[in-house]
Image (spheres, grey):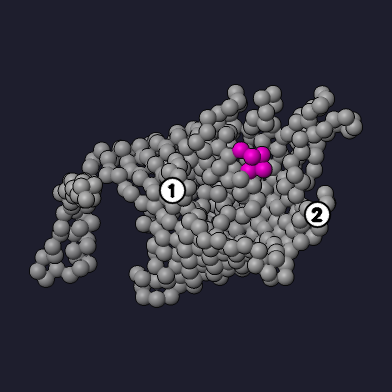
């Protein structure tokens, strides 16, 4: 009882200073809602601190997910309910040119996702330091709530540091320093519209989120995006150059590149991307030279937003199609042929293709539901060799953002 009383008192003490800052604006007699809204907007502009300092903004999202995996004959293999992501963010401005963001995830245990400070003196140049997503690929920067289907493509997850083939990295993030900017602005009578070129380049530990660097090398990552003639069209290329600690004696290469294109005008969304990765491993029981294996993957996704409902309370329904293909090991280079040399090869995986059809539904701006069916055409390992194998996957995911 005492514990509950202390909790209630603590909540009240927290609420008092927050409420003391709130202001209630009562519309004047004869003043319509539009006039009141315009007056409120002008008041907010007047009251905004000249130094750019703003109160911290709290936001986040929650994703609950159901997944069922079925055999090629349609027999249920397994199914589960789980919390896919539970994120809480705090962000704000320290001045007109300095902003910050802190984001955590609570699906397993409290875990730091993002934590950085950004200095942006102008549109053409900004620099940020801390932990954040590496500037690699066209799809990775998209918030998972806004993805067309339930998660990032297999090639993106395997080569961008979500569940990388080299075994290093998580969340697609790392600790480092990054410069960004937008060049060659396009304007019209309404002012600034977009920039023709967006760039991002950074230096990172190369060991993933919440991990110290364990070698003396830093990874370099960069992305370049061009919008030729229209804001909706994006041509993208990115490159990852790094090394990871395979064992105490050897730093394996971790090189990646991607090229992609996207068209997104708010209704029609079409995106495609090709990714290639070069990953190092090392032999033992002999003087085996460092060896490498290649991976590659690509995807194409298309959807169209149908809007319906009252203006200002519109609902969105997007039918989605996506095809993706990924090969973990497409070739081995630098391997010795001596019989006595044994190499630490990763488990070779047969090419796998995913055919997905889904529905992406926004009943309101803060709630999203996705239902996806995938036919997976790959192979499974039987007696040290692979056999063609097909399976099915059904995923439903409900997201709420605030």
Q: Residue at x 52, y 49 (%)?
A: 141
Q: Quadrant of residue 248?
A: top right
Near-viewer residue (7 or 307): 7
Residue 30 falls within the magenta-colored stretch: no
Closer mark to the observer between disc 1 and disc 2: 2
Q: Position of residue 24 (x, y in %)?
A: 15, 58
User: How far apart in space, not on screen, are marks 1 and 2 (Cα)?
Assistant: 38 Å
Question: Tag on residue 106?
Answer: 1
What SS does tag 1 mark?
loop
Decide which of tag 1 and tag 2 comes sooner along the chain.
1
Name the residue tied to disc 2: 382
Q: Position of residue 289 (x, y in %)?
A: 79, 27
In the rendered image of this protein, does residue 224 appear above or below residue 30? above
Q: Residues within 10 Å of mark 1 (few under 14, many from 20)?
A: some
Near-viewer residue (367 or 323): 367
Give the main secondary structure of the magenta stretch.
Answer: loop
What are the residue bounds of the magenta stretch?
Answer: 164-168
- In the drawing, does residue 258 fall left or right of residue 7? right
Q: Position of residue 338 (x, y in %)?
A: 89, 30
What SS does tag 2 mark?
strand
- In the drawing, does residue 325 fall left or right of residue 21? right
Near-viewer residue (332 or 385): 385
- In the drawing, does residue 125 fall left or right of residue 96? right
Query: Quick check: can you spot residue 320?
Result: no
Near-viewer residue (44 or 132): 132
Q: Residue at x 51, y 52 (%)?
A: 142
Query: Quick check: can you spot residue 73?
Result: yes
Single out the residue that lies furthest toward the bottom: 309
């Amino acid at each position: 009882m005492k514990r509950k009383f202390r909790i209630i008192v603590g909540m009240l003490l927290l609420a008092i200073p927050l409420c003391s800052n709130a202001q209630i604006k009562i519309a004047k007699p004869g003043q319509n809602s539009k006039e009141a809204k315009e007056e409120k907007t002008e008041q907010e502009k007047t009251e905004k601190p000249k130094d750019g300092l703003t109160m911290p903004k709290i936001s986040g999202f929650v994703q609950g997910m159901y997944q069922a995996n079925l055999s090629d004959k349609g027999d249920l293999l397994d199914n589960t309910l789980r919390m896919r992501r539970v994120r809480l963010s705090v962000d704000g401005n320290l001045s007109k040119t300095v902003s910050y963001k802190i984001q955590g995830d609570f699906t397993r245990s409290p875990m730091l996702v993002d934590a950085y400070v950004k200095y942006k003196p102008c549109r053409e140049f900004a620099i940020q330091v801390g932990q954040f997503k590496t500037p690699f690929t066209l799809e990775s920067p998209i918030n998972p709530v806004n993805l067309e289907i339930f998660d990032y493509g297999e090639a993106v997850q395997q080569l961008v540091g979500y569940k990388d083939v080299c075994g290093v990295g998580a969340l697609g993030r790392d600790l480092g320093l990054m410069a960004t900017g937008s060049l060659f602005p396009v304007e019209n009578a309404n002012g600034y519209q977009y920039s023709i070129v967006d760039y991002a380049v950074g230096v990172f530990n190369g060991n993933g989120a919440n991990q110290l660097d364990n070698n003396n090398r830093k990874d370099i990552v960069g992305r370049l995006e061009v919008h030729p003639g229209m804001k909706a069209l994006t041509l993208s290329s990115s490159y990852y150059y790094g090394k990871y600690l395979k064992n105490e004696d050897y730093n394996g290469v971790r090189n990646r590149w991607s090229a992609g294109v996207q068209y997104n005008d708010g209704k029609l969304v079409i995106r495609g991307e090709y990714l290639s990765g070069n990953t190092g491993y090392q032999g033992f029981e002999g003087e085996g030279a460092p060896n490498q294996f290649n991976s590659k993957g690509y995807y194409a996704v298309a959807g169209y937003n149908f809007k319906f409902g009252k203006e200002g309370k519109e609902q969105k329904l997007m039918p989605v199609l996506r095809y993706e293909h990924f090969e973990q090991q497409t070739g081995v280079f630098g391997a010795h042929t001596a019989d006595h040399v044994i190499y630490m090869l990763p488990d070779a995986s047969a090419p796998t293709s995913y055919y997905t059809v889904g529905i992406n539904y926004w009943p309101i701006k803060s709630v999203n539901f996705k239902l996806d069916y995938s036919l997976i055409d790959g192979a499974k390992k039987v007696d040290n060799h692979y056999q063609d194998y097909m399976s099915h996957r059904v995923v439903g995911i409900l997201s709420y953002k605030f």
